Image (cartoon, helix red, strand yellow):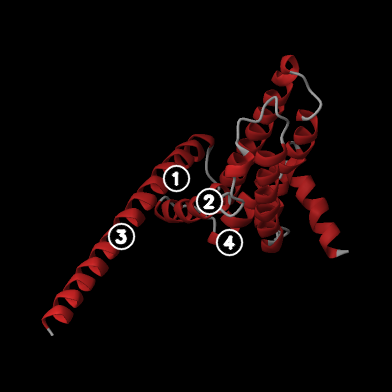
Amino acid sequence: MSFLKDIKYLLHVANHPFDGFWDLKYENKGKLRIAIFMVFIVTVTMILKRQYVGYVVNYNYPLSLNSINELKYIVLPFLLWCIANWSLTTLMDGEGKFIEIVIATGYAMLPLVLVNIPNILLSNVITLREASFYYLLDSFALIWFLWLLFIGTMTVHQYTVTKTLSTMLLTLVVMGIIIFLSLLFFNLIQQVISFIYTIYEELSLRG
């Protein structure tokens, strides 16, 4: 019963984002488990979309798809967004806690499920001339998601419209910096391990 109540509130946030995100922050109506559940459902939806969307709009080669690899297109960007946004807004007088950012971002992802699942079914019955309807719904899901993410970010941090937009853009920049530093770090670790292994081989041969 509690789960159904949480899902009902999730739908309320999608339809009434200003009230929904306000209650999420100040009435503690948002649930972390629902946000995590949304990330899981969106990941499953994207896997289904890549594999079972109609051939008219499907440019993927099904045999080359790896469901595990699909996680990096949803879970990794989700985590990076939350970490980067929290790191940035901490320095920009944001009022949002990390868990509030995670919940708001997870709740904002609902349109990617509400629109994309029917769109997958639609793609299997449309013709090439009707493919524009598929792309229109696809774009609508993305715009709806970005709108909810914008309202959620603005409400959680209590920012103005301008500051919210600039913060979201800067968050993307910070995400890029995190990715760059992570790759640099792992590359450095790989070189250190390779260097240690080379020394070990030299010592072994001399021994």
Identity, as a three-letter code, of the amino acid under mark 4: Ile
Q: Label 3 to label 1, Cα distance in Å?
A: 21 Å
For label 3, the SS is helix
Q: Residue 73 vs residue 115: left or right?
A: left
Q: Quadrant of the C terminus?
A: bottom left
Q: Position of residue 176 (x, y in %)?
A: 39, 45
The residue positioned 82% from the left and 61% from the top of the image is: 3
Q: Residue 99 bears which disc, if any? A: 4
Is the Cβ of the residue at disc 3 closer than 8 Å to that at disc 4?
no
Q: Label 2 to label 3, Cα distance in Å?
A: 19 Å
Crowding around mark 1 (Cα neighbors within 10 Å: few <14, some 14 to 19, many 20+) is many
Image height of 176 relative to 27, above or below: above
Of residues 174 and 47, the one nearer the viewer is 47
Crowding around mark 2 (Cα neighbors within 10 Å: few <14, some 14 to 19, many 20+) is few
Report which residue position mark 1 lands on.
Answer: 171
Residue 109 seen? no
Q: Position of residue 178 (x, y in %)?
A: 38, 52
Crowding around mark 4 (Cα neighbors within 10 Å: few <14, some 14 to 19, many 20+) is some
For label 1, the SS is helix
Residue found at the very far left of the displayed protein: 206
Residue found at the very far top of the displayed protein: 129
Q: Label 1 to label 2, Cα distance in Å?
A: 18 Å
Identity, as a three-letter code, of the amino acid under mark 3: Phe
